[in-house]
Amino acid sequence: MPIAKPANQVASTITSQHLSDRVLEIQDAFEVSPTKLKQIVAHFVEELKKGLSAKGGNIPMIPVWVMDYPNGTETGDYLAIDLGGTNLRVVLVHLLGGQKFETEQEKYHLPKGMRTTRNRDELFEFIADCLEKFFYKLHPNGIEKGALLPLGFTFSYPASQTRIDTGVLQRWTKGFDIPNVEGEDVVPLLMDKINEKKLPIKVVALINDTAGALVASRYTDPTTEMGLIFGTGVNGAYYDRVGNIEKLKGKLLPDITDDSPMLINCEYGSFDNEHESLPRTKYDILIDEQSPRPGQQAFEKMTAGYYLGELIRLILVELYEEKQVFQKYSKDSEQIKLLYTPYLLDTSFLAEIEGDQDLENFPEVVRLFQEFLKIEPTLDERRLSRALSEIIGNRSARLSVCGIGAACTKMNIKKCHCAADGSVFHKYPKFPERAADSLADIFGWKEENIHPRNYPIQIVPSQDGSGVGAAVIAALAHARQAKGLSLGLAEAYKKA
Ligand code: GLC
């Protein structure tokens, strides 16, 4: 069967022969064939295993000390916060049992420049300020003296956890770059600010967004085996067996046995940092070289929302330099200066270009170019942009699901739901279909003539991971603690 050429339809309507040839070249560079997908998955499985070994590998494979499966009976009131790229969300979750819950929430916009502030206190003070506002909105007169509200802190960066309520940031990802946080436990950094405000709140669990997505969905759907984020970053979580986690051998208290499940935050955005199997284009190489952390997050840089807008921008810059596009704007014009601004275009730019239904005139594309770049695109430039959005979006979806392919292969999971969240999954048209199609290529479902509706591994929208998921994880931790069981490495208990 010939490999689908997603951009052909639009690319073939481009009138300039040279431009249309360039699009096809770019398309070839971004293509990931079924054979290539299978090779990537095979390498990915090995890398997941390496991450669990005593020696370790590129993929951190972080045990997050969730050792139970939720079953929907968990109850209680929990606070949850989620530090995202643009917002801080604060949620009060009432777990009602019977797979039911209610939430009350508030979103606070992250002040401009916060992702890269030079003063780490600003970040933690901001979080504590938001918590304070939320707390007094809910409880204008405070709460019962001596009581403490348990807080699940969704901190979606690679953080090593010796216990469930700690998290030492390994390195920032997704464009965050704040000094003196890498190598530090972020829980005391936040708790200090909470305590300064005398808020009756205590962090009881540090949670990755993928772990939250998995646990929240599993609270209502017991067939969920993975939690996935296709958003600003790309990552996945699944339950492994403690016995498979070689790096924990000899480091646990006797109450954690080899058969115990253990939720793993893979942090597989760093898959293939050694550049062995991913088909990198020159644009991917540029993104990596110009990033604050070259050589890191190789997989994420090719697939995640934070980078997709930058990919199209780099291609458009190249085509401008080749005198193929935007020729009515001179190099020192405002428009071209905007075009040369790194990270000016975000994923919504691409997603909305793909959402344009009018393939004659592309009115949405015109609007987006005016809004972001002040450029009036010609018809050929609109077609080009549409073709490029499809090429970039398609590759992102195809590569992104290699993480699912790898984890399911490793765990021998043949049938399940994978709970997905994130802006790319929700906002990028066709992402879910393309992702399903790519999984079908990986597992050979097309040869078996399985209808997409019946694909055995289905990616479904997750429940609210950073709210409900964080609350359920906090509830599971609480239940374990009440039984006197450990939630971390033996050494973390000796110190405590
Ligand atoms: C980045 C983070 C990871 C997170 C993912 C999705 O890869 O390192 O912790 O899960 O983005 O938000």
Image: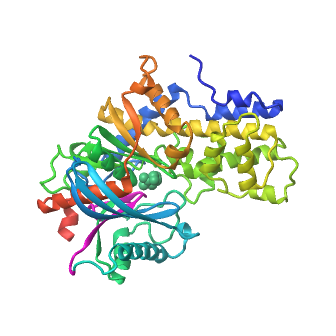
Count up the numbered dots: 0
In the visual, does 250 lie left or right of 6? left
Q: Is residue 151 above or below residue 352?
A: below
The answer to which image quadrant residue 103 occupies is bottom left
**Is any atom of residue 87 visible in this view?**
yes
**Is any atom of residue 277 visible in this view?**
no
Q: Is residue 456 above or below residue 297?
A: above
226, 431: nearer the viewer = 431
Q: Which quadrant, please, contains the C terminus? A: bottom left
Q: Where's residue 147, x and y in %? A: 22, 76
In the visual, does 194 lie left or right of 375? left
430, 492: nearer the viewer = 430
The answer to which image quadrant residue 439 occupies is top left
The answer to which image quadrant residue 12 occupies is top right
Which residue is drawn at the image coordinates 46% and 32% (left, top)?
436
Which residue is drawn at the image coordinates 49% and 40% (left, top)?
400
Q: Which residues are magenta?
A: 145-165
Q: In the image, is residue 225 part of the stretch drawn in magenta?
A: no
Which residue is drawn at the image coordinates 78% and 59% (left, top)?
337
Colour basis: rainbow
In the visual, does 257 lie left or right of 113? left
Q: Where's residue 242, x and y in %? A: 22, 46
Q: Where's residue 342, x and y in %? A: 67, 57
In the visual, does 60 lie left or right of 273? left
Q: Which quadrant, please, contains the N terminus? A: top right
Q: Where's residue 71, x and y in %? A: 22, 46
Q: Is residue 431 above or below residue 485?
A: above
